[in-house]
Amino acid sequence: MIDYNTEKIKLISKEQFNTLYQISQALNSVILEDSLIQETLDLVIKVINAERGLFVKYDSEENKFNIIAARNIQQENIDDLSVFSSGVLQKVIDKREPCLYHDVQSDPNVSQFKSIQIHNIKSILGVPIKHGEKIWGVILVDSLNNRKDFNEGNLVFLDFFSNLVSLALDKIIKMQELQAENIILKNQLQISKTIPEIIGKSSAMQKMAELIHKVAATDATVLLLGESGTGKELIAKAIHTLSTRKDKPYLAQFCGSIPDTLLESELFGYKKGAFTGANSDKKGLFEVANNGTFFLDEIADISIALQAKLLRVLQNKEIIRLGDTQVIKVDARVIAATNKDLKQLSKEGKFREDLFYRLNVFPIKVPPLRERKGDIALLVDHFIKKFSNKKIHIDPKALKILEDFNWPGNVRQLENVVQRALILCDDNKIVPDHIVIEEETDEIAIKGTLKDFEIMLLKKRLQEYEGNRTLAAKSLGVSVRWIQLKIKELGENI
């Protein structure tokens, strides 16, 4: 580093001091190292009266240089490092101090470098960029014609510049390290973090949680698919809570079994006099949810006419109130939910195909409770705490009854059964007698696949014969070998 005595500092001109001030402001505003020199290299080239400027990062392990920024006097980028003198770059690294070559063609120390001869370089200034004790990179300016301004005063200026860069670089590297740590922590949390208000640690719930965290960070339209009672509205709320819109409105509207005109007026609002009883203007829910999130539950139940108006909202982000002609712009993220097969309905002409594809940007399948039996104990504990102020335990046999049931009504049905058990419970323990589940036929109880029916039937027979596979097989009219294979196939579901 140059010894900055008073005489040396006097070599820096007023213009150069002003330039250093501008550069310090620019360096304080940057965040990423790739942009560290881009905004300032042009200033350096101009004030030194050079023709080209280069900032390189030095890789000490591989002993090579990588361009961060390279510019010419026309303020154009240079992408080819070979047009600069790699020999002089290496000399700056080896000497660890600023280097001035006023006339490289006649300087025996550097004139032998091939790049100097090929590109006819006349003068070079080079200074190291230090980070702690290490050389982080090199700043180099050169000229193919001019030599008179490549003097000690400009070398002092360039070294001042390198010190400013070093100070900014220290801040930026620390910031980048913190950002990298933050990304790692976020990724780790994404795997383990629970969804707000959602109970469950099963693999099915973990997979769904990962999808929720990913889509929440975007503004994509989400379609929640799943049976009734699986908690689709809670998931919609969770997506909103985890999104950048969390401080904006969250609204929900149930679309099933509501007359068309009433639903339309709720969604889009109306103008005074639009119909009997419309005594004043009213905002629709889409307007109220502007900049926030709007959850449409049971979307399959809306009429074809209303589907067309909903499509307009998704396509153009605009609505028209009932009885009005004025277009109103709205920006509400839409999350829709259904327990029906929208694709099949669109094939049957009962649901607009274009609306289906608008809604189906990011589908999430919400697993039924029978596919996450491992979460039942957690859910039971949650509902006990929700509905009772007393410390109540559940008998293992009572819990086994709950875990063995197929739950066609899913989490909502389980919640009702637990609440009922708490009413029947006189002391601090829920026992099997307190578990009252509605009697339902197998046809009603099973809304899933043939595999679901096999699981239920096999469980019932094994329970009936206290785990005796021979008797269970005889009652089902199958071999013991079949029972053994089926138990192995179904695994944890049995």
Image: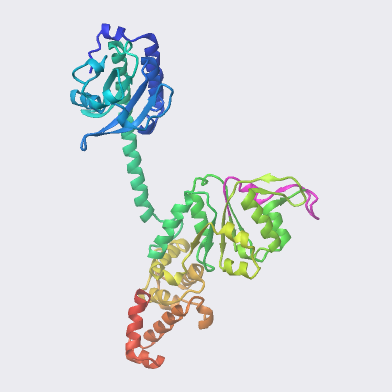
Q: Quadrant of residue 106?
A: top left
Task: Looking at the picture, tell me which residue is in the foreground, 259 or 147.
Answer: 147
> At x 52% / y 69%, what residue is drawn?
227
Question: Taking the image as drawn, is residue 202 in sight?
Answer: no
The colour scheme of the drawn protein is rainbow
Front residue of this view, candidates 373 and 29: 29
Whether residue 314 can be seen here: yes
Q: Quadrant of the N terminus?
A: top left
Q: From what the image shows, is residue 227 above or below residue 35?
A: below
Left or right, 298 with respect to 182, comes to right
Residue 412 at x, y = what percent? Answer: 51, 67
| Image quarter of residue 209 | bottom left
Q: Residue at x 46, y 72 (%)?
A: 421
Q: Which residue does the image show at 40% across and 84% down from the upper left?
A: 458
> Image check: 185 left or right of 341?
left
Quick one: 105 or 458, which is closer to the camera? 105
Query: Bounds of the magenta span?
Result: 272-294
Q: Position of residue 116 (x, y in %)?
A: 27, 23
* Residue 93, x across and y down, in percent: 21, 26
Percent x, y of residue 203: 38, 64
Q: 126 and 169: which one is in front?
A: 126
What residue occupies the far front of the structure in this picture? 118
User: Magenta span has 125?
Assistant: no
Question: What secondary structure prevails in the magenta region?
Answer: loop
All told, the count of numbered labels is: 0
Would you say residue 290 sits in the magenta stretch? yes
